[in-house]
Image (cartoon, grey):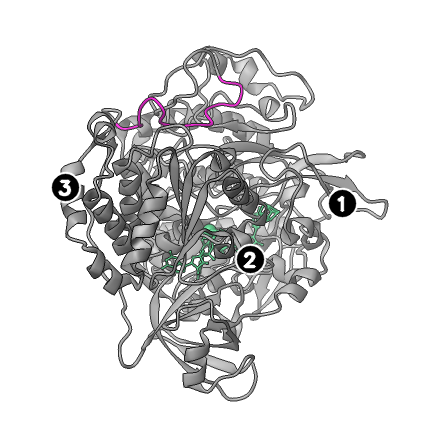
């Protein structure tokens, strides 16, 4: 193992902060700053700084567990793998391949996500695979594909943010979710630009804004339409841009004109003068951006909502121009790459579509199988979880903890319990792993090498810096072992670089083309990474020696091969393969067939569940800085628990007074799905009609006991961000 410090990236969020891991004399590693990585320049949040603690914690899994007499008991690897393969074979024989399900995660490296998708289609032959990214950025992805023909969270690097004029940050709270990224917004303002934050709560991010709009949860679509209405009425449309670079304006315009400012004020609670001020700031001459995150996206109309914000950019000529555009701040460590390489229900590697015959032929050839043997598209994440125990009898889960993180979690938990068989690969015994029949302890992050793709579309290399505990294997080894037992001896290598070489070929010519990226290239310089698309010279890929050669990470990179225009709207390229791939998209053309961006005509519609007499308050959910997602990892770290010990219900003093509740009093929050109890946290920063709960905890305070699984018709995203609840004082203290 390395004796010097190893440059790598954080295991948690999509910012993928650069850091280095330095060996400790006592064993293990400590995190040291790496100021040379341009995105975070050394800055880290507490989760990143404390990440090694999870790997050495006492609750780390180090042996397979098998259910016996109702409890999980230690077992050997051969026994555990035999058991899983045997159960999968039995269920398949009895009920067909689609009775087998696979659930993945956006935290898995590109190599793991790719291998998992291939495993489902080639080894199990099932269509029933999806992943937690469906709960994350799927609405923004769907809207981006509609409008631009391509979904890469940010079509520009974060470093462009301080160089634009105005940013509207919609339902994004980087102060909690990506603290080192706040600097880009502060620099924007230092440079004379303005920041508008749209959030029902006055978050710590909103404190940094020039203007804070606090709409009612679930009304962002109306808000964006109202702003577009004013932009038209005030004659601020960029007519030439609309003519030259877009299609569909007339219909989108007509839809927006039906949303009068006064009508929008009634729906959203944002006053007409505030709407006008936002338009004035956004329409200052020069560049501007709209960035969305989970606030507007995790709604049953998330796709239309993001579409409406994109329309705003297009109408004002703010997309595909320098320092302008729409972007989605993706969430998980590999949230971007995890959605490109085939763990999504309808997808093949390279962001190809499973129902596209040409895509099937290409990928089947790389996989050495008959295209007709590949199953078709399967169910989305919530629909898959909802089908457990009925259509889907047996599940392999890798990289998610749905008992805590899925909507209507009590129901999902009940579905999971009703499975014939559940196998979970994890680092710790998550709440979902605790329900499994077999748990496999796997390596993670610093214990293995692999690539991730950050929210900027920047492909990065994480390097092994630690020896994994005895008894632990990698997810790739698990898939290799299961494939062999199910009769597929080849095609599931355990070396991540070998998997990446195959991923390159499978992605070649696709939208997310990684074929010009290699481990060697990623290890160059300060490891700034390479932005996709990055097509290779076809000769490069056909040379079997080049493909098979394991790289020494210290070796210099091979010379730049000529580019091939993948037609994916690249623009930074042109002459010669770019050293960093394609940092900026769409400057010449969008990735649609005609190169034009498409307006979408959208209209306001209410949330799936509006407040009524029985459930008069709106619930929204989200994050706090010291915990990550379902908390499976961060709830094991003392310093993070000290900072964020448990769930809470954030509410306005007026609502608290009506309930007769004081700070810290136990509050019961009740929805049509269930009940959760947590202490009151009273703040004037939240709308009086809304309560907020973080979703990081299981048990009594589980926010997802309450949330509504109503799905967006296009993206199949659940409505995590708005449902109707009743709030009452609960007996005792939680
Ligand atoms: N500390 C921490 N950081 C994380 C994560 C974590 O779990 N913990 N997870 C990572 C992942 S996977 C993700 S997806 C990102 C998410 O990052 P964010 O999207 O920034 O996080 P959230 O807290 O889910 O939601 C952002 C804001 O949306 C607001 N909001 C709620 N309802 C609405 C609404 O109807 N409209 C609008 N406009 N806003 C609304 C909330 O008040 C919240 O402040 O964070 C990543 N980073
Ligand atoms: N109410 C509400 N619910 C939400 C959200 C919300 O805003 N509100 N946000 C949603 C969003 S955006 C997301 S992304 C989801 C996330 O929610 P989850 O999908 O539950 O995400 P994690 O908690 O990160 O779970 C990852 C699991 O994989 C394990 N793990 C980590 N690395 C590896 C690895 O390399 N291999 C394997 N096999 N396991 C690994 C971890 O220990 C952990 O148990 O939650 C969603 N749920
Ligand atoms: S902001 Fe995200 S990537 Fe950076 S240290 Fe924190 S969790 Fe890790
Ligand atoms: Mo996410």
In the rendered view, does 429 fall on the left or right side of 285? Answer: right
In the rendered view, does 250 fall on the left or right side of 709? Answer: left
Q: Callout 3: few (<14), some (14-19), or many (20+) C-alpha neighbours within 10 Å?
A: some
Front label number (3 vs 2): 3
Where residue 344 sits in the image (x, y, percent)? 38, 43
In the rendered view, does 311 fall on the left or right side of 294? Answer: left
Given contact means CB atoms under 8 Å apart, are the residues at marks 3 and 2 in contact?
no
Most prominent secondary structure in the magenta stretch? loop
Q: Tell whether position 591 is magenta.
A: yes
Residue 549 falls in which quadrant of the image?
A: top right
The residue that mark 3 highlights is 251
Residues rendered magenta in the picture: 578-592
Q: Quadrant of the C terminus?
A: bottom right
Front label number (1 vs 2): 1
The residue that mark 2 highlights is 438
CB of mark 2 near ligand 2 (< 8 Å): no
The residue that mark 1 highlights is 29
The furthest residue to the right? 25
User: Marks 3/2: CA distance?
Assistant: 54 Å
For numbered disc 2, what is the local secondary structure? strand
* Depicted 690 relative to depicted 446: above or below: below
Q: Tell whether position 654 is magenta.
A: no
Q: Say which residue appears at 46% left-offset and 17% top-offset.
A: 536
């Amino acid at each position: 193992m390395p004796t010097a410090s190893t440059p790598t990236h954080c295991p948690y969020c999509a910012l993928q902060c650069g850091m280095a891991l330095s060996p400790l004399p006592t064993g293990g590693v400590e995190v040291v700053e790496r100021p040379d990585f341009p995105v975070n320049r050394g800055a880290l949040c507490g989760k990143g700084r404390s990440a090694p603690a999870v790997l050495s914690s006492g609750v780390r899994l180090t042996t397979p567990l098998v259910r016996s007499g109702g409890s999980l008991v230690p077992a050997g690897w051969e026994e555990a793998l035999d058991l899983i393969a045997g159960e999968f074979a039995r269920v398949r024989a009895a009920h067909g391949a689609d009775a087998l399900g696979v659930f993945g995660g956006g935290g898995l490296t590109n190599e793991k996500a790719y291998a998992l998708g291939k495993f489902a289609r080639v080894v199990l032959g099932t269509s029933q695979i999806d992943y937690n990214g469906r709960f994350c950025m799927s609405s923004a992805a769907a809207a981006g594909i509609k409008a631009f023909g391509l979904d890469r969270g940010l079509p520009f690097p974060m470093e462009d943010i301080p160089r634009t004029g105005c940013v509207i940050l919609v339902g994004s709270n980087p102060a909690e979710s990506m603290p080192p990224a706040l600097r880009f917004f502060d620099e924007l303002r230092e440079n004379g630009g303005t920041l508008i934050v749209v959030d029902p709560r006055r978050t710590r991010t909103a404190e940094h804004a020039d203007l804070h709009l606090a709409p009612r949860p679930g009304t962002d679509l109306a808000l964006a339409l109202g702003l577009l209405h004013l932009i038209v009425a005030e004659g601020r449309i960029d007519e030439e841009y609309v003519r030259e670079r877009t299609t569909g304006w007339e219909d989108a315009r007509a839809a927006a004109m039906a949303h009068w400012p006064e009508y929008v004020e009634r729906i959203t609670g944002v006053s007409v003068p505030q709407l006008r001020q936002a338009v004035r700031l956004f329409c200052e001459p020069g560049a501007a951006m709209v960035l969305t995150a989970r606030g507007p996206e995790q709604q049953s109309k998330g796709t239309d909502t993001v579409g409406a914000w994109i329309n705003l950019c297009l109408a004002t000529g703010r997309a595909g121009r320098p320092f302008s555009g729409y972007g989605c701040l993706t969430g998980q460590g590999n949230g971007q790459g995890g959605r490109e390489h085939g763990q999504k229900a309808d997808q093949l590697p390279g962001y190809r579509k499973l129902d596209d015959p040409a895509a099937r032929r290409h990928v089947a050839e790389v996989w050495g199988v008959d295209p007709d043997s590949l199953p078709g598209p399967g169910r989305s994440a919530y629909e898959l979880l909802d089908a457990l125990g009925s259509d889907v009898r047996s599940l392999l889960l890798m990289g998610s903890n749905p008992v805590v993180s899925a909507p209507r979690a009590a129901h999902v938990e009940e579905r999971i319990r009703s499975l014939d068989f559940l196998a979970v690969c994890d680092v710790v015994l998550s709440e979902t792993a605790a329900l499994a029949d077999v748990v496999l302890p796997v390596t993670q992050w610093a214990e293995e090498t692999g690539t991730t793709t950050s929210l900027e579309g920047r492909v990065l290399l994480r390097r092994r810096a630690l020896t994994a505990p005895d008894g632990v294997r990698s997810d790739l080894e698990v898939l290799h072992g299961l494939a062999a037992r199910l009769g597929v001896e080849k095609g599931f290598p355990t070396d991540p670089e070998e998997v990446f070489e195959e991923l390159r070929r499978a992605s070649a010519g696709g939208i997310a083309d990684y074929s010009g990226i290699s481990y060697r290239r990623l290890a160059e310089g300060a490891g700034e990474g390479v932005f996709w698309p990055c097509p290779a010279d076809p000769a490069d890929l056909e040379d079997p020696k080049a493909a098979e050669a394991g790289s020494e990470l210290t070796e210099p990179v091979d010379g730049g091969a000529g580019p091939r225009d993948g037609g994916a709207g690249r623009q930074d390229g042109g002459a010669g393969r770019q050293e960093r791939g394609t940092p900026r998209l769409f400057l010449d053309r969008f990735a649609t067939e005609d190169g034009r961006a498409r307006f979408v005509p959208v209209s306001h519609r209410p949330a799936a569940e509006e407040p009524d007499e029985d459930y008069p308050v709106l619930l929204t959910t989200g994050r706090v800085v010291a915990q990550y997602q379902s908390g499976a990892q961060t709830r094991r770290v003392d310093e993070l628990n000290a900072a964020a010990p448990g769930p809470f219900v954030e509410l306005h003093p007026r609502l608290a007074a009506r309930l007769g509740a004081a700070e810290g009093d136990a509050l019961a929050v009740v929805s049509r799905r269930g009940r959760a109890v947590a202490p009151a946290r009273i703040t004037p920063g939240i709308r009086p009609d809304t309560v907020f709960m973080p979703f990081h905890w299981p048990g009594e305070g589980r926010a997802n006991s309450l949330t509504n699984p109503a799905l967006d018709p296009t993206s199949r995203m659940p409505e995590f961000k708005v449902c109707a609840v009743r709030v009452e004082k609960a007996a005792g203290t939680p």
